[in-house]
Image (cartoon, grey):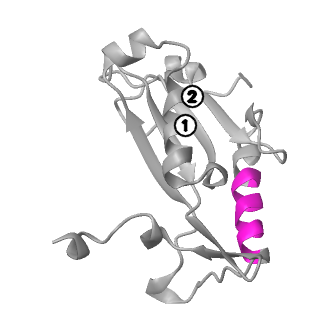
């Protein structure tokens, strides 16, 4: 849109279709809004992390045990599901993810429609693994992906 040519390292991406991609972020009121710049997505993530820190979350940045503060999720549905729900499928997916991971923890997503070999659009979702609990009437937060995802060793 800015007259710049998009160069992708992924050979499956058709740069001519990149402008069909859409991205959304949660604004400061918690409402979904279409991004106008990539900073919108970063700001949504930062707001959630700041909330977690204000409510006691500690974030480690010391070596191999760094805290995962944003976890990407990728969702792709079959073409029949998308065709049947063409203009709402992405909102259905977001609603399910918000129920699963917490409404405020899903901070943004992009719908990719520019890959040659995939007939189906897919979504990249940003998820801040903030676990909220209440203690003595106060909200306490922990940033921990293991509160949401189990280690495969633990499942065996």
| Mark 2: secondary structure | helix
Residue 57 versus residue 15: which sits nearer the camera?
57
Residue 136 versus residue 22: which sits nearer the camera?
136
Q: Which mark is residue 94?
A: 1
* Residue at 57 percent of width and 28 percent of height: 91
Q: Percent x, y for residue 13?
A: 41, 28
Quick check: is 36 in the magenta stretch? no
Q: Which mark is residue 68?
A: none
Q: Percent x, y for residue 72?
A: 48, 53
What residue span does the magenta drawing correspond to? Answer: 43-53
109 relative to 118, above or below: below
Q: Quadrant of the C terminus?
A: bottom left
* Residue at 71 percent of width and 71 percent of height: 52
Q: Quadrant of the N terminus?
A: top right
Q: Few, some or many C-alpha atoms within 10 Å of disc 1 (few <14, some 14-19, many ≥20)?
A: some
Q: Percent x, y for residue 40?
A: 76, 44
Most frequent secondary structure within the magenta stretch: helix
- Left or right of 42? Residue 115 is left
- Left or right of 38? Residue 130 is left
* Residue at 79 percent of width and 75 percent of height: 54
Tell whether label 1 touches label 2 (CB within 8 Å).
yes
């Amino acid at each position: 849109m800015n007259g710049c040519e998009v160069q992708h390292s992924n050979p499956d991406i058709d740069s001519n279709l990149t402008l069909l991609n859409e991205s959304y972020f949660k604004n400061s009121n918690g409402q979904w809004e279409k991004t106008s710049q990539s900073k919108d997505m970063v700001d949504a993530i930062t707001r959630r992390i700041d909330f977690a820190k204000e409510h006691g979350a500690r974030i480690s940045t010391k070596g191999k045990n760094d805290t995962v503060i944003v976890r990407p999720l990728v969702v792709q549905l079959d073409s029949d599901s998308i065709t049947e729900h063409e203009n709402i499928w992405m909102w259905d997916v977001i609603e399910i993810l918000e129920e699963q991971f917490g409404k405020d923890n899903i901070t943004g997503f992009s719908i990719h429609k520019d890959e040659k070999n995939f007939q189906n659009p897919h979504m990249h979702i940003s998820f801040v693994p903030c676990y909220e609990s209440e203690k003595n009437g106060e909200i306490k937060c922990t940033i921990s992906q293991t509160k949401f995802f189990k280690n495969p060793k633990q499942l065996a």
